[in-house]
Image: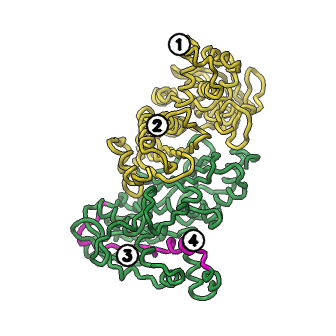
Chain colours: A yellow, B green
Amino acid sequence: MRDLGEFALIDRINAGRTQGPAVRLGPGDDAAVLAAARGNYVVSTDMLIEDRHFRLDWSNPDEIGRKAIAQNAADIYAMGAEPVGYVIGLGVPGDTPVDFVTRLADGFWAEAERAGGSVAGGDIVHSAQLVISVTAFGDPLGDRPVTRSGAQVGGTVAIAGRPGWSAAGFALLSHAHPGVVRRNEDSTGGVVAAAVAAHRAPRPAYDLVRAAMVTGTRPEALTDISDGLLADLGHLAAASGVAVAVESVCLCDPDLELCAAELEADARQWILAGGEDHVFAGVWAAGVAPPPGWTPIGRIEAGRGVTVDGARYRGAGGWEAFSGSESAKSDHSR
Amino acid sequence: MRDLGEFALIDRINAGRTQGPAVRLGPGDDAAVLAAARGNYVVSTDMLIEDRHFRLDWSNPDEIGRKAIAQNAADIYAMGAEPVGYVIGLGVPGDTPVDFVTRLADGFWAEAERAGGSVAGGDIVHSAQLVISVTAFGDPLGDRPVTRSGAQVGGTVAIAGRPGWSAAGFALLSHAHPGVVRRNEDSTGGVVAAAVAAHRAPRPAYDLVRAAMVTGTRPEALTDISDGLLADLGHLAAASGVAVAVESVCLCDPDLELCAAELEADARQWILAGGEDHVFAGVWAAGVAPPPGWTPIGRIEAGRGVTVDGARYRGAGGWEAFSGSESAKSDHSR
C-alpha cells in the first residue's frame, strides 16, 4: 500500500462504483454534497477498532466492511429513517495489502446495497491498528424521525430480528470447540455456522423497519439493540420516562439453545445481553398491533427501568466501552 | 477513564454545551438530526492519528481538539459552505485521564465556536493509539456549493491566509533549536512562537471565505490547501481542465524567512509545499477583483498543471499519506 500512494488507492477503491441518487457530489473534491429530501437529515457515527470490534483471524475484510456499515445503517433505521450516504475514515497499517483494502471496500458497498445509500467520501491515513470510522446519513421515512423517548404506558414492545446470535457466535469462536467443527453437518452444525456468520457480519432487518414506517402503523418509539437487549430497553425506558416489562417466554430461541448446549452456556444471557445483532425494538401504542414480522416481547408500564418476568433487571448484562463488565457483548481484547 | 464508563464520560463531555440552531436532536439517541436549510448539505471527514498527525509531547489536548475541528471545518468552507454540526469518533487508550478527554472536547467546542456549528454526536471506544475521526456537515453559503472544477482561463487565483507557517512550526519543533528558545524575546522569537502555535492549531481564515460568498463576488472555484499549496492547486487545475501559473513574488513572507534563517532552511519550500495551515485558494473570473483580504498569487491559463514563475511544478513537494515522499507537510512518524 505504501508503494501505491493515497490518491491511487482511493481511485482503486472508487473504481466502478455508482453513487446513489441523494449524492449530488461524490469523492474527489474537498467535501461531498448530499440532498436532504425532507429538509432534515439523520446522522450517526461509529468507530471500529481491530482486536476490539473485530479480529482479522476471525473475519475476512468483506465481513468487517459489511459489519461496519451495518452497525451505522442500523442506527439510521433506528430513527425511522433510511441511509442515503456514508463517509468512511480508514486508518490502516502501512504494510496492509492493497487487496485487503479493496475487499474491505467491497464489504462497505455490499452492505450499503442492502441498507440503502452509497459511500460518498472518506479519508485514508496510516495507523498502528486497523481503524474504521463510519458516519452514515439518512432521510426520515416518515414526517419526522422516531426517537427513543415516545413510548407511552400501555404500549406494546416488539422486536425485529433475533437477538443473541452474534453473542453466540462470539462464544463459539472464542472457545473454538472441537465439537463445533466435527458436527458441522448435523442440525447443530447448521445453527453453529449461522451464529458464527451472524457474529462476523450481522444482517439487521432493515426491511421490517421500512415496512413499519411506510404501512402507517409507525412505532411511537424505536431503537436498535447495540449495547444489549435489556440495556437498550433501559435507555428507551429512561428516555421515555416509563418502565419496560419483558416476558422472557417471547424470547425463547430453540436454535440458540442448541448452540448453548455445545458450550454448556446460557442462551438466555446471550439473548438478554447480546448487542451486536442490531435487532430493532419498537413500541406501538395501546391497541395498535405491531406490523407483520415484529415479535411482541413485552409492554410499557408506569414506573422506571426494565423487568423480566416481573423481576427487576439490575444492569449486569449491560455493556459499556470502558467498564470491563462481564457481558455477552463481544469484546475481543479482554 | 476505565473506571468512569463510556456513558458517564459522554455525559461529562456534553455537560453544559449548547447545540447550534441547525441541530434538531443532539447526543443521546441512536442518531442526531440536523436541518438542511438549503436542501443540500456538505459533508467532509478526516481522521487524525497520534504520532502521525499530532504528538502528545508537542501539543496539549485543547490544541489537538482545535486542530481536528479546524481541518474539517476548512473543508466545509472550501465548498463555499459553513459548518452547522460535527460528529466525532474517538478511540482512546484505556489509561487516558478523563481530564485529557474533557480538554480535548473543550478544544473541539472552542474551534466549533470560531468556525460555526456544534458537536451533535459521537462515539468513544478503546484503542491502542489516540484516534480522532471528525465528520463535519455544512450548509452552502450561496445557492450551490463551489467546487474545484469551475476555474476558467483568464481567472485570478488568490489565497486567504498565509501558507507555510505550520510547516515552519513543524520544522522548528522537530529541531528543538537552542537558539529558538534563547531568542524568544526578540523579533525572531515572536515569529518562531507564532509558527509553533500555527502548527499546533491552525486558524483558517473562515471569515474571508464567508465574506467572499456573501458580498456577491463569489469565486468560480475554491479549495483548501491541505496537501501543499502547489499540490492542491494541481488538483484544482486538473479538476477544471486548466493550468495554474503562480508568481512566487506574491508569496514572499519576510517573517517566515526569519524562521528559516534560524534553521538554515528554505522558507519557499514551506510556502509552496506546506499544507496544514488550511489556507483557502479561490479563482475569480477575468475582470473580477478578489475580495479584500485575499492575496492574488497567479492566474488561470490554458493547458495543464502548475507553473511557478513559468517553471513547471513536478510534484516533488506534493504529499500523499502512503508515499513517504519528502515534503514540508508534517508527518510525525517518519
- Local SS, label 3: loop
Q: CA distance from mark 3 to mark 2?
A: 42 Å
Instruction: Say whether residue B22 is visible.
Output: no
Which contiguous range is marked in magenta?
B149-177
**What x and y, as percent, mark residue B31?**
56, 43
Tell me the kind of residue under disc 4.
Answer: Ser
The residue carrying mark 4 is B174
Asked if residue B12 is positioned above or below residue A256 in the image, the reply reads below
- Pair 3/1: label in front: 1
The residue carrying mark 1 is A185
Contact between marks 4 and 2 (CB within 8 A): the answer is no
Q: Chain of mark 4?
A: B
Q: Residue at x 62, y 40 (%)?
A: A52
Queried whether the magenta region covers residue B165, the answer comes back as yes
- Local SS, label 1: loop
- Judging depth in this view, the residue of A81 and B98 nearest the camera is B98
The residue carrying mark 2 is A82
